[in-house]
Amino acid sequence: MSADGDPASSPSASSSGFHPRDRLKRELTLWDAVMLVVASVVGSGIFFTPGRVAELLPHPGWILAAWLAGGAISLAGALANAELSAMFPRAGGDYVYVREGIHPAAGFLVGWLSFAIIFTGTIAAVAAAFAEGVAGPLGWGEGATVALAIAVTVLCSWLNYVGVRWGARANNGTSVVKIAALGAFVVAGPLFGAGDWSNVFAPALGASGA
């Protein structure tokens, strides 16, 4: 440890190959980490995208095939991230992986792209979908819907700003509610649904096309 008591500037820290900025305080528990993964894999879009998929693929067999293909792609990404996180157990995520695997300049660009475009666009899309889902049944106008989307974005940003623990608590709560809602759909479907398995195996193409 250095004279000023900073472990990140000690010889052992520098010789380990870890950049000082890669060392963050560990504040998340195992449950928090599991809920973060759940929230990433089972996104809020699950409540909005099935309807859009059904519009584009109006046959149950194609819809199931699309979800299976998406699941396979997601699994490949999850396995790749698991391998990278084991190789580079440092704070920073994709920034660290690209910085170490390609070049520091590439890592810099990935970090800023994530901040300015990638995650920003995702947050806006999810907030808009949430606001539309709430405003639709209530009969709200466009102005109220946009205001709700902005308010939700500001609230989530504030929760993450005040501290990691507050952000983790909010994520844990919303993840539990989300999984509970999906579980209710799974149970209620067979009990109250009027579907038929023959729809899945019906011909997807007829003489006149799809």
Image (cartoon, rainbow, N blue to C red):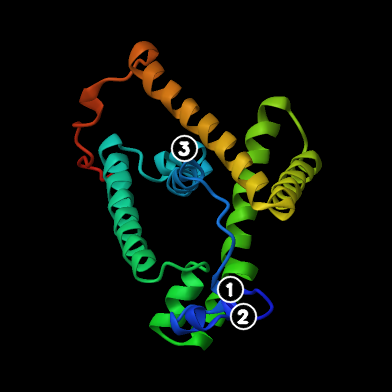
Distance (Cα) linking label 2 and label 3: 58 Å
- In the picture, the quarter occupied by the C terminus is top left
Q: Secondary structure at mark 3?
A: helix
- Location of residue 164 with respect to 116 vertically, above or below: above
Look at mark 2 in the image and give the residue it sits on. 2
Residue 58 vs residue 110, the one in the foreground: 110
Q: Earlier in the sequence, mark 2 or mark 3?
A: 2
Depth-wise, is mark 1 or mark 3 nearer the camera? 1
Q: Earlier in the sequence, mark 2 or mark 1?
A: 2
Label 3, residues with CA under 10 Å away: few <14, some 14-19, many ≥20: few
**Residue sitting at x 54%, y 72%:** 22
Q: Earlier in the sequence, mark 1 or mark 3?
A: 1
Residue 108 vs residue 83, the one in the foreground: 83
Quarter of the view holding residue 2:
bottom right
**Residue sitting at x 32%, y 20%:** 195
Label 1, residues with CA under 10 Å away: few <14, some 14-19, many ≥20: some
- Location of residue 25 with respect to 21 vertically, above or below: above
Where in the figure is residue 176, as x and y percent of width and height? Answer: 51, 32
Look at mark 3 in the image and give the residue it sits on. 51
Q: Secondary structure at mark 2?
A: loop
Q: Which mark is residue 7?
A: 1
